[in-house]
Image (tube, helix red, strand yellow):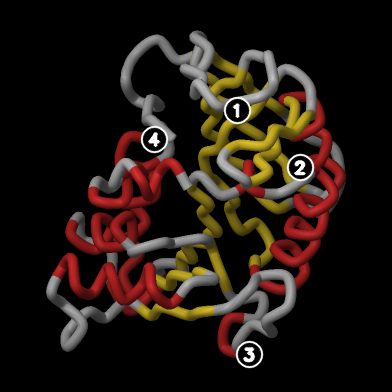
Amino acid sequence: YKCINYYKFVEPRLSYRFYYRSLVDMKNLGDQAPIIIDLGCCTGTDLRKLMLDGYPGNKLYGIDINQHYIDTGYDLFLDQDHCPITFLVGDIFTTPIPSYLHQRVGVIYTGSVIHLFSLTQFHTLMALITTQFLLPNGLFMGTQVVADATTSMTRRGNTKHFIGMQDFKEALERHHFVDIELCKEPEPRQKDPDEDVDLNTYWLSFRCRLGTSTNTSTSIVDVHDDDNKVDE
């Protein structure tokens, strides 16, 4: 992955997002602060940033398919013997979730993960998040690369998927998310020389809430500063 090759995991990219401050402010709820899961947490850098900014570490969970990334996080931050964050290893599509997390999660965050999934896989992921993880009115937020229309490409032997903006919004609505906020960079993402598809792609940050119907409100804005900008 490009983000691994370029050491992007060293910097907490979550803190640049438009929703970050509201996420941190949930710490003021004390014992009622919601459980936050970073789905595809890699080295856990974003979770550690949340904890550094005051969020209770015992309410933070990271899930990744690769134990090596989690171990690298412990090595990078030298905190394996005292880090209160819970890290779990498994494939979100096949590994049963622990019973103590079942429908008890207040926030699901995904950073640079969704563009690894096809649109069909994304629908499967949404079904898991809404039925297995999130509380009613729970929040789903994240950042990924999107395109004007849904497509895929091959890069260095890996297939990468770009869900179109409209398809992404409709998928969220289909799975009963409401109050959808979409924050897209106005300028196209810089292409890699080995990308075999000629299309414009953009970084998109989003936040939405799990409701009880498909009646949604959606806000789409372009970003003209650095609050949403990050390399892949």
The image position of residue 111, as x and y in percent, is 48, 47
Q: Amino acid at mark 4?
A: Arg
Which of the two discs, 2 and 4, labels the residue nearer the N terminus?
4
Quadrant including the C terminus: top left
Which of the two discs, 2 and 1, labels the residue nearer the N terminus?
2
Q: Amino acid at mark 3?
A: Ser
Disc 2 secondary structure class: helix
Q: Amino acid at mark 1?
A: Leu
The image position of residue 230, as x and y in percent, is 37, 30
According to the image, label 4 marks what residue? 17
| Placement of 174 over or under 35, stated as above or below | above
According to the image, label 3 marks what residue? 99
Q: Pointer 2 and pointer 3: residues touching (CB < 8 Å)?
A: no
Q: Amino acid at mark 2?
A: Leu
| Placement of 178 over or under 126, stated as above or below | above
Q: Pointer 2 and pointer 4: residues touching (CB < 8 Å)?
A: no
How far apart marks 4 and 3 lie (CA) works out to 30 Å
According to the image, label 1 marks what residue? 182
| Placement of 152 over or under 81, stated as above or below | above
Crowd class of label 1 (few under 14; some 14 to 19; many from 20; radius 10 Å): many
The numbered mark at residue 172 is 2
Asked if one can make out residue 87 in the rendered structure from this viewpoint, the answer is yes
Residue drawn at x 43%, y 77% as measured from the top left:
67
